[in-house]
Image: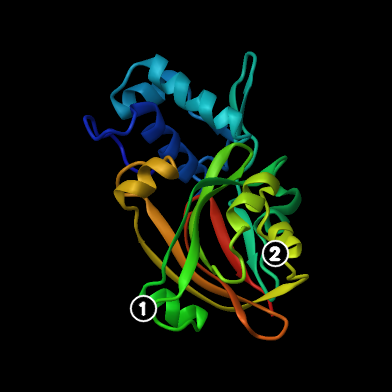
Amino acid sequence: MAGQKVQRQTGVALWRQIADRIRASINQGDFDETGMVPPETALALQFGVNRHTVRSALAALGQEGIVRAVQGRGTLIERKERLNFPISKRTRFSQGIGDQAREARSVLVAASREIASAEVARWLKLTPGAAVVRLETIGRADHRPVSRATSWFPADRFADIAEIYGTTGSITKAFRELGVADYVRVVTEITATHAEEGDLTDLELSPGAIVMNTRALNADLDGVPVQYSISRFAADRVRFTIEN
């Protein structure tokens, strides 16, 4: 199993660290022969914690739909695969997750109007000093966080996008209300790094976890940039498929 003893006094609950380790082991196929998670007593000994902590970790994984307690048998593995997230000409979070989860949605965490940095202005092809609207969002699938994104939009065109997104929970619907009937992905850059402190909290990860970082640009059908985003995905929960 990925890792052994958990790290104490890290600011990350022990049960969450254990849940992350068990989830990673399931993704790696460590329990494929039995289709069952090891007994609570074995897990408690392995991680150096009490059974109550292990039980909390398994309960969290049960809420995610990854495992299921079976009376008289133990804990059955329900889902072994990462969520497949397609990156294509039209990349959308909810549509991308599709029927892989019972529920997929994005939640607005924060919004502000600001002056575009040199990087944001370059991606959105704005003049220096132009105003942008910044949205901070978390994408969830079956109540577990999958991604954390920061997106910027030209303020002169999308001044009300935060309010509309807060109501609809959809960038696509917000764009439609603001006159953009359709938009396409221009470029996506993908890198992998260790999770930063903010990622540990927002994505409910344990120290040492890996996140996939994407930088993406969307444009309207006239080729005018409408959205620049930097997103962090929990690497043990999502895999990317590049579609032509």
Nearest to N terminus: mark 2 or mark 1? 1
Residue 50 in picture, x, y percent from top left: 34, 16
Q: Amino acid at mark 1?
A: Ala
Reading the image, the residue beneath label 2 is 175
Tell me which corner region of the image, top left, top right, bottom left or bottom right, holds residue 7.
top left
Reading the image, the residue beneath label 1 is 118
How packed is label 1: few (under 14 Cα within 10 Å), some, or many (20 or more)? few
Q: Is residue 1 visible?
A: no
Residue shown at 61% from the left, 19% from the top: 73
Tell me which corner region of the image, top left, top right, bottom left or bottom right, holds residue 63.
top right
Q: Quadrant of the C terminus?
A: bottom right
How packed is label 2: few (under 14 Cα within 10 Å), some, or many (20 or more)? some
- Between the residue at mark 2 and the residue at mark 1, the CA separation in whole angstroms equals 24 Å
> Which type of secondary structure does the marked residue at label 1 adopt?
helix
Residue shown at 41% from the left, 15% from the top: 52
Q: Amino acid at mark 2?
A: Phe
> Which type of secondary structure does the marked residue at label 2 adopt?
helix
Front residue of 178 and 95: 178
**Up/down of 85 relative to 121, above or below:** above
Residue 114 in picture, x, y percent from top left: 42, 63
